[in-house]
Amino acid sequence: MEDVSAVTQLLKDWRSGNEKALSELMPMVHDTLRNLAGKYMQSENAGHTLQATALVNEAYLKLVDSEVTWQNRAHFLAIAAKSMRNILIDHARSKGRQKRGGNDVLVTLHEANVAGNNATPDLLDIEEVLNQLAALDPRKSEIVELSFFGGMTYDEIAEALNISAATVDRELRFSKAWLQRALNELN
């Protein structure tokens, strides 16, 4: 079990130049990152070549190399979630999958009931509509990413974005409806 305040302190220590903090951080957050990767990988088809452990490792390497000044554990996990999603998108694109018609990568938003119909949106469709939402309202897009892709609670999202949980709830409800409509228009 990870100690939230200890993780936050290690992140601050690491960014202050304490290299030992990084070696102490990974064991503390590995299970959380692995669970996050597992959520991403649940919806992948059986023939998908990227495994959850590889996704964690690749995301962790990107996080280590980033120039982000971590605010806290929630901020770290939010960036990790976005990094994992970007890795999966890059992986889908590198497979040469055409925008429509392939089955290499499937990611559902079933838990959120965003699709609204029986069609399963693919990762590239989701990326497209999230980019559209981000152009309209970047914070709503970020809330969607943290909730659906990051598996974060309303309170964790509120902490990461410095807004209230009620605002997270309200903006997420709006975003779900908007995404459902946008995905239906794509299909």
Image: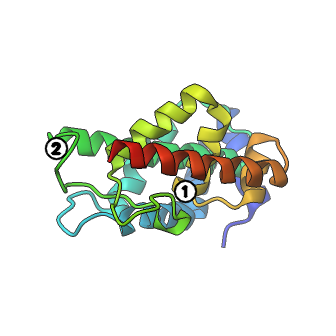
Give neighbour class at mark 2: few <14, some 14-19, many 20+ (Cα, 10 Å).
few
Q: Toward the viewer: 44 or 26?
A: 44
User: In screen coordinates, is 125 left or right of 173?
Assistant: left
Tell me residue 54's x, y (percent). Answer: 33, 56
Residue at image point 17% right, 65% down: 47
Residue at image point 21% right, 44% down: 100
Residue 80 visible to an observer of this rendering: yes
Q: How many marks?
A: 2
Q: Toward the viewer: 45 or 76?
A: 45
Which label was assigned to residue 27? none
In three-dimensional space, the C-alpha distance between marks 2 and 1, rounded to whole angstroms, equals 24 Å
Element carrying mark 2:
loop
Tell me residue 166's x, y (percent). Answer: 83, 54
Residue type pointed to by label 1 = Phe
Q: Mark 1 = which residue?
A: 148
Tell me residue 167's x, y (percent). Answer: 80, 48
Residue at image point 19% right, 56% down: 103
Q: Mark 2 = which residue?
A: 95
Tell me residue 58's x, y (percent). Answer: 37, 47
